[in-house]
Amino acid sequence: MPEGDTIFRSARSLHRALAGKPVTAFRSAYPLLTRFHDDTPLTGQTVELVESRGKWLLIHFSGGGTMATHMLMSGAWHIYKPGERWQKPPSTARIVLENRDYLAIGFNVPVAEMHTPQSLVRDRRIPPSDGDLLRPDFDAEAALQRVRSQANEEIAVVLLDQKILAGVGNVFKSEVCFVTGLNPFRRVSTMTQDQVAHAIAVARRQLASNVMEDSPDTIVTYRGTGRRTTNQADPTASLWVYGRKGQPCRKCGERIRSRLQGVDVRITFWCPRCQPTPDGIQIDG
């Protein structure tokens, strides 16, 4: 599943390709989108802003509507120039948005819906803008209070909650816990305020380090989702613990362990020596 860094990069590229330009054509495989377009045509409207909010990507139109998409496991946005060959089959195109210079195509996008300003605020699945870890206006103090309010939850579960910290996915969840030395099964109630603040700061830093800085004029048509949380140049050593069950810890040599965690049964990786188990908790993995 794409995490916050991937969605941020997609939104940045889409904004550069679409913002300030009138829409010349729109089509979609989703009846709710086409019905909105029939009632309030998107053609002729201008894209005002494309932004990411955690794992959601939002396209705001001058007529007041907002298209919200979520990629889940299969979706991706690509950008092409007119006449350029697509890298995925046309049959997988769920949304096509065109202007005079570019085509923005949502391939296999599983969740797509239109919102008014009012319905966007009411939708509790979509985080507010200041809850996104990659936003310049991210409110770290408010995030700290949100994390601490989940006192009885395990820290790795809280990190994945998009209403708490928008943008952290399963990879970054394990990597943040490792870098901060926190056992992922530790309850928030056992953490100090400084430990919570440190985890939030590391999450922001890791996400930001995976958002490639480039020219403001650059349009990225397609990019993979490889990411790095270590400082090692070796491409095979890009992550500390994620996906490395049974392999030696890059810091201490202990074997990395894994276990399913939380009601959503997401896999978690950790080093039992660098991230010692809290007293009284038995972990098999």
Image (tube, rainbow, N blue to C red):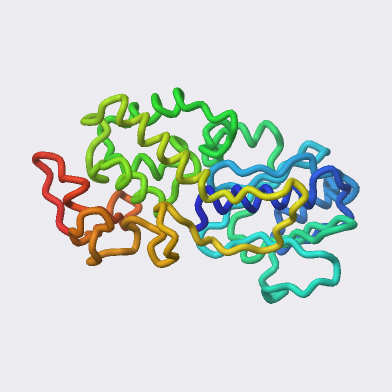
Relative to 128, residue 59 above or below = below
Residue displayed at 70% across by 52% down: 13
| Residue 22 image point, x, y percent | 88, 48
Asked if residue 219 lies left or right of residue 242, the reply is: right
Of the 4 image quadrants, the one containing the C terminus is: bottom left
Q: Nearer the viewer, residue 138 or 62?
A: 138
Farthest residue toward the left?
A: 280
| Residue 208 image point, x, y percent | 52, 43
Q: Nearer the viewer, residue 99 or 26?
A: 99
Give the number of marks: 0
Asked if residue 197 lies left or right of residue 162, the reply is: left
Q: Nearer the viewer, residue 190 or 68?
A: 190
| Residue 107 image point, x, y percent | 66, 65
Residue displayed at 61% across by 44% down: 52
Residue displayed at 9% across by 41% down: 280
Residue displayed at 18% across by 52% down: 272
| Residue 264 image point, x, y percent | 35, 52
Res 47 → quadrant: top right
Res 123 → quadrant: top right
Asked if residue 164 lies left or right of residue 7, the reply is: left
